[in-house]
Image (cartoon, rainbow, N blue to C red):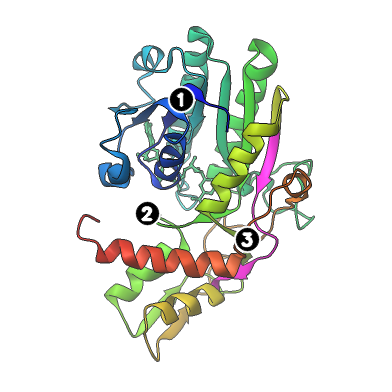
Amino acid sequence: MQKLSKVVVTGGAGFIGSHLVERLLEFCNEVVVLDNFSSGKVENLKNVKSDEKLKVIRLDLLKNNEINDKIANADVVFHIAANPEVRISEPKVHLEQNILATYNVLEAMRKTDVKKIVFTSSSTVYGEAKKIPTPEDYGPLEPISMYGAAKLASESLISGYSHTYGIIGLVFRFANVVGKRANHGVIYDFIQKLRNNREELEILGDGTQRKSYIHVSDCLDAIFHVLDKESSKYCVYNIGNLDSISVSEIADIVIEEMKLKNVKKKFTGGVEGGRGWVGDVKYMQLDVSKLISSGWMPKLSSKEAVRRACRELLEDIATPSF
Ligand code: NAD
């Protein structure tokens, strides 16, 4: 990677953000984390807390008057902060935490002349895609959750700022990202449920929901791969795996990794044909050929990523500071 003098990571104390910060510190002179610690934790940055290049600032992106001086002179802003919980259907949460926060970051960039943003979007922008695997140029984009709608709105804002004010926008649409320090998602949920009840596991939906999973290490490899090569003003990349795994198979992996026997899997049946919740996309696999043709390849399959993440989360739980 090319050496950068200053980068800003919003949401850098969260799951993906903290892994990103660890990587950025290897080749940046200054890494500034802006986080309100709503779901992020100081402990997530414990591996790098004594690094003098790291500056952690408690800041809420909804307080737009505080952002400008923190991001001034940055080479790149990695805008990771969001409310990532697809299951929250309250529109105001997504309007504020996802759309308004993105607008505030972009406005601060425009005012301070910061020229590059990396944005973590999501497969949910595709909604119930008729084409699977789904490529970046699939349309029409009809998200079926408020989270997906907010991600799509944020992408549109970035595109507008890019074409109007010359801000370079790199948008990454993630499949499900898993790994150490994840604080939400199906593996995390199953582990929590099984810690409370070792005999029965409640599974939302009918268990046949099938999605693509990627380990956070492969996901970050993909981001840095694109950062090094891409020179367009605005571009979109899917980041996901070449395969998928069902919710029921994930449950089996978690049960096995927790060394539990005779656990009864209790399916709630869910809503609208076996979805976990309203807004849950039942089948998701992203077409990642754009990334692969540029030379990137995931090291772990969906199943391997899930298994490794499960082990890592169990290790997190066994570590006192978590
Ligand atoms: P996370 O909750 O661990 O991280 C989000 C971080 O943003 C947290 O540290 C939180 O404290 C911070 N934050 C939230 N609102 C803020 C605000 N108003 N001001 C300042 N900080 C704020 O979630 P994650 O899984 O690491 O997700 C990171 C990004 O990747 C999000 O944008 C999410 O939508 C996206 N994404 C994640 C996945 C996944 O599977 N984890 C999939 C697709 C997209």
Q: Is residue 274 among what the camera can see?
A: no
Q: Which of 195 and 8 is in front in this view?
A: 8
Q: How far apart are marks 1 and 3 (CA)?
A: 30 Å
Image quarter in which the C terminus is found: bottom left
Q: Horizontal and vertical percent for residue 228?
A: 64, 33
When the figure is inspected, residue 121 is found, relative to residue 209, above or below; the finding is: above
User: Mark 2 Cα within 10 Å, few/some/many (few <14, many 20+)?
Assistant: many
Res. 7 mark? 1
Observer-nearest of 107 and 53: 53
For discs 1 and 2, the disc positioned in front in the rendered view: 1
* Distance in Å between CA atoms under marks 2 and 3: 19 Å
Counting residues from the start of the chain, the first of labels 1 and 3 encountered is: 1
The spot of residue 119 in percent (x, y) is 56, 33
State left or right for residue 93 relative to residue 153: left
User: Cβ of disc 2 within 8 Å of ligand 1?
Assistant: yes
Of the residues under marks 2 and 3, which one precedes in the sequence?
2
* SS for callout 2: loop
Q: In the image, is 161 to the left or to the right of 23?
A: right
Residue type pointed to by label 2 = Arg
Q: Do the residues labelled 1 and 2 touch (CB within 8 Å)?
A: no
User: How far across and down, in percent of the image, does residue 169 sit?
Assistant: 63, 26
- Image quarter of residue 319: bottom left
Q: What stretch is highlighted in magenta?
A: 236-247
Residue pictured at 66% horizontal, 37% vertical? 226
Of the two numbered discs 1 and 2 on the same chain, state the one appearing first in sequence: 1
> Would the CB of label 3 be found within 8 Å of ligand 1?
no
Residue for point 70% across, 22% down: 233
Q: Name the residue under label 2.
A: 181
Determine which residue is flagged by label 3.
212
